[in-house]
């Protein structure tokens, strides 16, 4: 097994509560996920607030394939959201987001991603996770800064 961590920041003109609500709402969040093609609600397990199955379309050279992983919201507070995504074989991605007001109407979201997978899968999976989360960060900011309808 191999582990890695990366971080990113999002600064959006929004209320903290709106940012927390978005990051705790995996189906809404995956509407901006660059690889997700389907989301289905699952029965949450013990210690889990909400669970969903997310199916993503991936490419490896000329090969395209689908993966489905389970994403669990495990903690939601006024300034923190933790989700854990698990996919076979033995791959886990933990997303730990912390929120704080910057006092000018901007919310700062500090995201730490901890990724673990079998050593042979790690370079592809970790690289893909960084790429997807970089793109997802832009989508999160866009959603949070959309004018109210």
Image (cartoon, grey):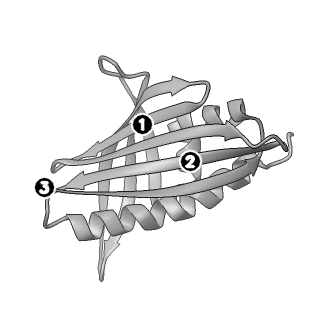
Q: Position of residue 85 (x, y in %)?
A: 34, 42
Counting residues from the N terminus, which is met first, the one under dot 1 or under dot 2?
1
User: Residue 82: which quarter of the image?
Assistant: top left
Secondary structure, mark 2, is strand
Q: Relative to the observer, which residue lies in front, 116 or 40? A: 116
Secondary structure, mark 1, is strand
Alpha-carbon neighbours of circle 3 within 10 Å: few (<14), some, or many (≥20)? few
Counting residues from the N terminus, which is met first, the one under dot 1 or under dot 3?
3
Residue in the picture at 24% in, 52% down: 116
Residue annotated with mark 2 = 110
Quarter holding the N terminus? bottom left
Q: Relative to the observer, which residue lies in front, 104 or 65? A: 104
Q: CA distance from mark 2 to mark 3?
A: 26 Å
Residue in the picture at 56% in, 45% down: 29
Residue annotated with mark 3 = 1
Residue annotated with mark 1 = 83
Counting residues from the N terminus, which is met first, the one under dot 2 or under dot 3?
3
Q: Position of residue 138 (x, y in %)?
A: 64, 60
Quarter holding the C terminus? top right
Secondary structure, mark 3, is loop
Residue in the picture at 31% in, 48% down: 68
Classify 28 as above or below 35: above
- Horizontally, residue 12 falls left or right of residue 90, namely right
User: Residue 47: which quarter of the image?
Assistant: top left
Would you say the residues marked 1 and 3 are in contact, meaning their CB atoms lie under 8 Å apart?
no
């Amino acid at each position: 097994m191999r582990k890695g961590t990366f971080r990113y920041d999002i600064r959006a003109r929004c209320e903290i509560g709106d940012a927390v609500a978005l990051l705790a709402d995996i189906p809404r969040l995956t509407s901006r996920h660059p690889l997700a093609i389907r989301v289905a609600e699952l029965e949450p397990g013990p210690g889990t607030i909400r669970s969903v199955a997310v199916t993503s379309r991936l490419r490896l050279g000329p090969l395209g394939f689908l993966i489905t992983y389970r994403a669990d919201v495990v903690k939601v507070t006024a300034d923190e959201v933790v989700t854990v995504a698990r996919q076979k074989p033995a791959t886990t991605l933990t997303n730990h987001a912390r929120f704080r007001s910057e006092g000018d109407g901007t919310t700062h979201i500090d995201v730490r991603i901890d990724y673990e997978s079998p050593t042979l899968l790690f370079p592809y999976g970790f690289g893909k996770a960084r790429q997807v989360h970089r793109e997802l960060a832009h989508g999160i900011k866009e959603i949070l800064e959309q004018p109210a309808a």
